[in-house]
Image: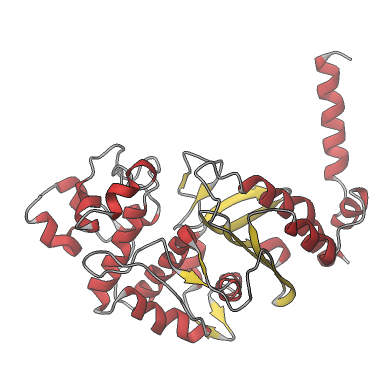
Amino acid sequence: MDISMKRVVIGIMFVFWSGFSVSQKVEAQGNPPSIEEINNEASTIPSVTSLLIQQHGERLSEEYFNGMRASERTNIKSAAKSIISLLVGIAIDHDFLEGIEQPVGPFFEDYFEKHPDSVKQALTLKDLLTMRTGLETTSFHNYGRWVTSDNWVWFALDQPMVEEPGGDMVYSTGTSHLLSVILTRTTGMSTRDFARQYLFDPMDISAGGWDRDPQGYYMGGNNMALSPADMMKIGQMVMNGGTFRGERIVSEAWLKDSFRTYTRSNFNPYDYGYMWWKKPVGEFQVRFAWGFGGQYIFMIPELNAVVVLTGSLQNADQSRSYKEPVFDLLREDILRFLQDRESS
């Protein structure tokens, strides 16, 4: 069969498959896995320490692996950036901040009095939220130098401009840390106290360890500890459009803006909103918070489902080798199971 004929056949097969209903597709793929089979498969992934699955607000499964316990909090790593994004939205909702176009210069007068820079001073909250400040990263090869510096804020702002503001993504935890400092300086509360009052306490969430910088500011976007069950509460609140048990936590408008696509990772085929990721998995668009080592809050709006998965940091490395088996589990097992429930 020549190449042109192969393309015709593939095209016909795609049209034929696209015409199937959800239930027909599930049937054509074979019987979906059971919860027991999903958990058995999860247990074979060395990095996985917990897996929680919820649909329409109903907890379908909650399993822990490799010695982890339900009461244990885990370092959610950069999934904390999505928490910072929620806190910024809450601060705007409560008029602590004016809006995303607010320039950052006035928040860091102590720095810019000594290092005036009209470009950096004009950066906006939106530039920070979307990782499009253009500043050189403080992550990856620069992370060690940043976290051992005497002043994390000044180190981040000292970085040279490597992209145009509002241009390509430059992923940097220093950028998200600036948002934490802004929250503290604007609200008059530490980021942890602000989070406790407006996010954690209303949702009965108890945060564990949370690093601080040399000046005492809570780290914006890394090294925060939450239990998987509390991560699930965050995901469900977002799925509910910003409410939790009938109480408004963050505005629905903020969440809609948070999940628009503003840029794309320069390391992965993932779209980026306000510190939330998006990626097609199978036939579904999945929104997620993501932390190093395999800390995930997955949200699948089409299936009204939330999946929390945490991973061990003990053997995690920069190769991100935990990702493929996790996304395989999500695509081949979890989504098929949820799709079958939705169609039946």
Task: Locate residue 81, reporting x and y percent.
Answer: 43, 61
Task: Locate residue 102, reporting x and y percent.
Answer: 26, 61
In-image side of 234 versus 119 (left or right): right
**Which quarter of the rendering shows the N terminus?**
top right
| Residue at the outermost top position | 2
> Between residues 300 and 160, which one lies in front from this camera angle?
160
In-image side of 82 versus 235 (left or right): left
Looking at the image, is 39 positioned above or below residue 230?
above
Looking at the image, is 276 positioned above or below residue 317?
below
Q: Residue at x 61, y 70 (%)?
A: 239
Quarter of the rendering containing residue 214? bottom left
In-image side of 28 versus 246 (left or right): right
Residue 152 visible within the image: yes
> Between residues 269 and 258, which one lies in front from this camera angle?
269
> How many marks on residues?
0
> Between residues 76 and 342, which one lies in front from this camera angle?
76
Looking at the image, is 125 positioned above or below residue 11?
below
Task: Locate residue 39, reporting x and y percent.
Answer: 77, 63
**Which quarter of the rendering shows the C terminus?**
bottom right
Quarter of the rendering containing residue 8? top right
Q: Residue at x 28, y 79 (%)?
A: 189
Quarter of the rendering containing residue 190? bottom left
- Colour scheme of this structure image? secondary structure
Residue 122 visible within the image: no
Task: Locate residue 13, reporting x and y percent.
Answer: 87, 34
